Amino acid sequence: MYQKLFKNFENVKNLGGKAWEHAIAVDFFNSSNIEDCSIHCFHYQQMLECFFKHILETKSPIGSYSRTHKLNKLLEELIFLTQFQTDKSKYRADLLAITVCAAEYRYNFDLYCEAYFESVVVCDELLTELIKFEADEK
């Protein structure tokens, strides 16, 4: 699913290309029987982070982004610095949850996978909005 969403970035040498690479990893983990969802979360968070930063780099007037890994902060930057508009309050908690889950992966903590995947469903809506925005704004 994610590889198709990021098809336009296949092997592109920028952050959009990195998002595509993480999308491939997420799709792999979706089709595997690995029970620990933390590796899925790590790549999902990286996919979103790279895509947020790609849009900030290519669509904002200053062409740059902050060094944060916090997805909710990157969404706020994106709304402030580009023409992208969305209800950020709808996504804030789920973006924060994914950011925290990805940090927990680094420390080998167990995740509550059901709750994590509920956040993914919500963030997939945002991802769809972002893909459309990126394609429409060329």
Image: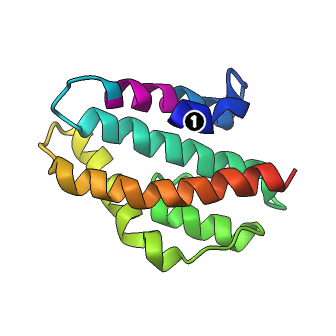
Relative horizontal placement of residue 118, taking residue 91 as reference (left or right): left
Q: Is residue 18 above or below residue 58?
A: above
Residue at 81% in and 59% down: 62
Relative horizontal placement of residue 51, taking residue 96 as reference (left or right): right
Can you give x and y, in whole percent of width and height, for residue 103 in the image?
Answer: 29, 47
Q: Is residue 34 above or below residue 110?
A: above
Look at label 1 and name its amino acid. Answer: Ala
Residue closest to the far right: 138
Does the rendering let one see residue 135? yes
Can you give x and y, in whole percent of width and height, for residue 40 in the image?
Answer: 32, 36
Instruction: Give the total of numbered labels.
Output: 1
Can you give x and y, in whole percent of width and height, for residue 135 in the image?
Answer: 78, 49
Relative horizontal placement of residue 134, taking residue 15 as reference (left or right): right
Can you give x and y, in whole percent of width and height, for residue 72 in the image?
Answer: 47, 65
Does the rendering let one see residue 64? no
Residue at 84% in and 61% down: 61
Task: Classify residue 14 by image quadrant.
Answer: top right
Residue at 52% in and 36% down: 2
Relative horizontal placement of residue 20, taking residue 120 as reference (left or right): right
Residue 92 belongs to the span the image colors magenta: no
Q: Is residue 1 above or below residue 66?
A: above
Residue hosting label 1 = 19
Q: Nearer the viewer, residue 6 or 49?
A: 6
Mark 1 lies on a secondary structure that is helix
Residue 29 belongs to the span the image colors magenta: yes
Residue at 84% in and 56% down: 137
Q: Is residue 97 above or below residue 31?
A: below
Magenta span: predominant SS is: helix
Q: Residues within 10 Å of mark 1 (few under 14, many from 20)?
A: many
Task: Classify residue 41 by image quadrant.
Answer: top left
Which region shows up in magenta? 22-30
Q: Nearer the viewer, residue 107 or 88?
A: 88
